[in-house]
Amino acid sequence: MTPTWKRTFAIIWSGQFISLLSSSAVNFAIIIWLSLETGSAEVLAFAAIAGFLPQTLIGPFAGVYIDRWDRKRTMILADGFIAACTGIMSMLFYLGYSELLFIYILLALRSVGSAFHMPAMQASVPLLAPESELLRISGINQVIQSVSSIAGPALGALAIGLMDIGYVLLLDIGGALFAIASLLFVHIPNPEKAETAQRAGIKQVMRDLRLGISAVTSNKGISWLFGFSVLATFCIMPVAVLFPLLTLQHFGGGKFEMSLIEVVWGVGMLVGGGLLGIFKPSLNKITIINGMHILLGVSLAASGLLPASGFILFVALTVLGGIAASIYNASFTTVLQEKIDASMLGRVFSMYFSIALLPSMLGLLGTGFIADNIGITLTFVILGSVIGIIGIVSFFVPVLMKLGIKEGKPPVPVAQEMDK
């Protein structure tokens, strides 16, 4: 820990902001392109699967190597890989190969890079800032993501209206290069590793993986937190995919309305992250997480009950959903950073992303069937209600509620555990 940690974060955040902004623009441009070209819930679901499945499958193993490798170098290489893959895809589109298959491949390759970059970034935070500032930092991270979510869709809609999808992809390359440049100007420390952690054999890798799993399963509160988050994510993923089609088909919107919904979701996330960054609430973080599950569930369920003329109310409910998602994400991340040893965080975050997303793939596979047979609006009502119920039930799990009481990290360093 150094007194210059604020400066370090400022440099990192500047690069991440440009990268997130460009990625948000490109992602939304791809959504618009797919929605207008196909109008198919199944196509959007398959695109989401392509964007998450690689990260889900390799995530736990990526976490092992994130905890072994230099974390700064890992983030740089991950960003570079994403930029290189995007450049290849952009060239293919320029040559006229604008098929769905190439969109799926691009999203899958980006997912591989994200499997290393996101956990490495989250695992580095406790090594850079005081523990008392972790929730505030998570809130500021949410603000940065929110501003990107606000400006990104507008930029993406403008870009897809002016350029071919192949040229739009170039924005993501520029953002990745900017993020890499910012990382070159900072020092990111790595946790101390036991001698056994330096070995790269398959047995040691599997042992490291088991230690990461043990870090979660040995704490019943963390296990319950993971379980409820997985259930909520299972419900959220299909709904998230259907947002553009709800705007287009139920409310009769177009590009502007689709962009507006993305922007106001970002506004909600900005507000939620801003509240955490400014006030740093002292409430039990599990209470906050449960409350945000309820608020998000209510906003989604109510959106499905609106008539076709209720687009303005849909906008307002989307803002509330963004606030809930932002505060939930920041609180969840902070709980893990406070309760898990820093040398294990790469594995734990990677494992969480995988565990949460793997069952969601099943939900996404059924998105087309759900939309065609149950209806988009009823899907919002059902899944939103389930998310709200998860938040209510969570209050009645004592071991989970105790997890939000600040007691510090486990006293035994992971290095000692690995040497046993």
Image (cartoon, rainbow, N blue to C red):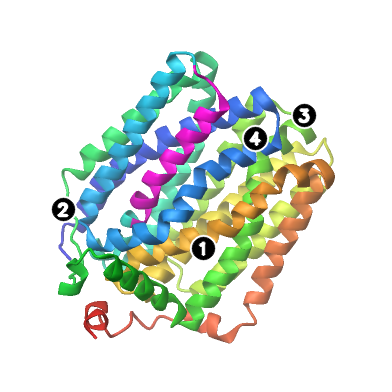
- Asked if residue 150 lies left or right of residue 264, the reply is left
In the rendered structure, are the residues bearing label 3 and label 4 in contact, judged by CB atoms less than 8 Å apart? no
| Distance of label 3 from label 1 (alpha carbons) | 36 Å
Going by the numbered disc 1, the residue's amino acid type is Ile
User: Quick check: can you spot residue 8?
Assistant: yes
Which label's residue is closer to the chain start, 1 or 2? 2
Percent position of residue 4, x then y? 16, 57
Front in this rendered view, residue 354 or 224:
354
The N terminus lies in quadrant:
bottom left
Which label sits in the foreground, 2 or 4?
Answer: 4
| Distance of label 3 from label 2 (alpha carbons) | 50 Å
Q: Which residues are magenta?
A: 97-119
- The residue located at (61%, 67%) in the rendering is 291
Task: Give neighbour class at mark 4: few <14, some 14-19, many 20+ (Cα, 10 Å).
Answer: some
Q: Secondary structure at mark 1?
A: helix
Residue linked to disc 4: 43
Percent position of residue 358, x then y? 55, 57
| Distance of label 4 from label 1 (alpha carbons) | 24 Å
Residue linked to disc 2: 187
Percent position of residue 375, x then y? 82, 44
In the rendered structure, are the residues bearing label 2 and label 4 in contact, judged by CB atoms less than 8 Å apart? no
Residue linked to disc 3: 252
Which label sits in the foreground, 3 or 1?
Answer: 1
Task: Tell me if residue 334 comes above or below residue 277 in the rendering.
Answer: below
Which label sits in the foreground, 3 or 4?
Answer: 4
Which label's residue is closer to the chain start, 2 or 4? 4
- The residue located at (64%, 25%) in the rendering is 255
